[in-house]
Image (tube, rainbow, N blue to C red):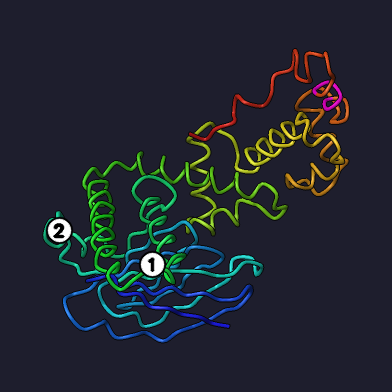
Amino acid sequence: MFHERELRLGPVWMTATELPPGWRWRLPGRERPPGPEMGRLLVPLRGTRLHTAWDGRESVSAPGDLYVHGLSPLQMSAFEPVDGREVCRAVSVGFPTALPRLPGGGIDRLRGRRAAGDSGVGALLRGFLTQVVGHADTLRPTDGPRLGTALLDLLSAFFAHLLESEAAGEPEGRRRDLTLRIGAFIQQRLHEPGLSPATIAAGHHISVSYLHRLFQDHGGLTVSSWIRRQRLEAARRDLADPLLRATPIHRIAARRGFVHAAAFSRAFRAAYGLPPRDYRHRALAPHGRGAGAGQEPLRRDNSIN
């Protein structure tokens, strides 16, 4: 069932929300806590997308995102499971907008900004929040203010980073960051047969046409071609792995997103010049040079950097 827990860390407050797999939940907006002007950071941790409405605007943030919404109270928040199998977890962080080391009005300029939480300062902040939620039962009352001070420092560093990126105003840098995030997103989901340009674009809140332009700018491959190359490379590595020698080839193909074993075999042979079975035999031969001797793995276009 729906579970929500609030933690007060000095001037900062956190609300940790958890839903069972497959559940959807919609909450009405809440009044802003009393005290100084507060901002809010939304952090989906696992298994859920967060839909929010505030000040006449709406947003969607997915796992891995860090989202700064308006200073007005939320009018609505809804939890949507990503795949219906994972427990949905998310954290909302309320903080005083008069953060140290930020120029006046800095937080207000970040309204509606979504940032990656899987690298740099964003990853540190997201990891800190995850750890606090995970160890909430072991915290003492005196730990709250100390953790709140540390969290304010991380928030300040994170917001300063966003403001500096905004000031730099380099579209190419933002495109590169988005492209790297998309690459990581694809790598984590190669096993999903339904992975497609449409699902990738939806997961990053961009249009399919813009997604295709990103790939054209970074290597010239189509999105589907790049996914196919990554799947083949992953399958090739699995076939050459001694720990997987007993795993049937059709299972290796399936775990890398190939639905039909015959289609996988044809694609693999076209890419590497050998059927998967022969490739594995050479790779695992006790005294052989290994499959791929004289063969060039699909690495030339293995990056969209």
Residue 10 lies left or right of residue 201; in this view the side is: left
What is the x, y in percent for residue 274? 84, 24
Classify 53 as above or below 218.
below
Q: Nearer the viewer, residue 11 or 78?
A: 11
Residue under numbered circle 2: 100
Other residues around mark 1 within 10 Å, as few (<14) / some (14–19) / many (≥20): many
Mark 2 or 1 closer to N-term? 1
Which amino acid lies under the numbered mark 2 shown in the image of this protein? Pro
Amino acid on which the number 1 mark rests in the picture: Leu
Residue pictured at 26% horizontal, 58% vertical = 150
Query: Residue 42 in magenta?
Result: no
Q: Secondary structure at mark 2?
A: loop
Q: Position of residue 122 (x, y in %)?
A: 36, 52
Name, please, the residue furthest toward the left.
Answer: 104
Q: Position of residue 177 (x, y in %)?
A: 41, 43
Mark 2 surroundings within 10 Å by alpha-carbon count, few (fewer than 14), some (14 through 19), many (20 or more)? few
Give me the disc on residue 96: none
- In the displayed structure, would residue 104 be above or below residue 257? below
Q: Is residue 248 left or right of residue 59?
A: right
Label 1 belongs to which residue?
A: 42
Tell me the quadrant of the picture where the N terminus can be found. bottom right
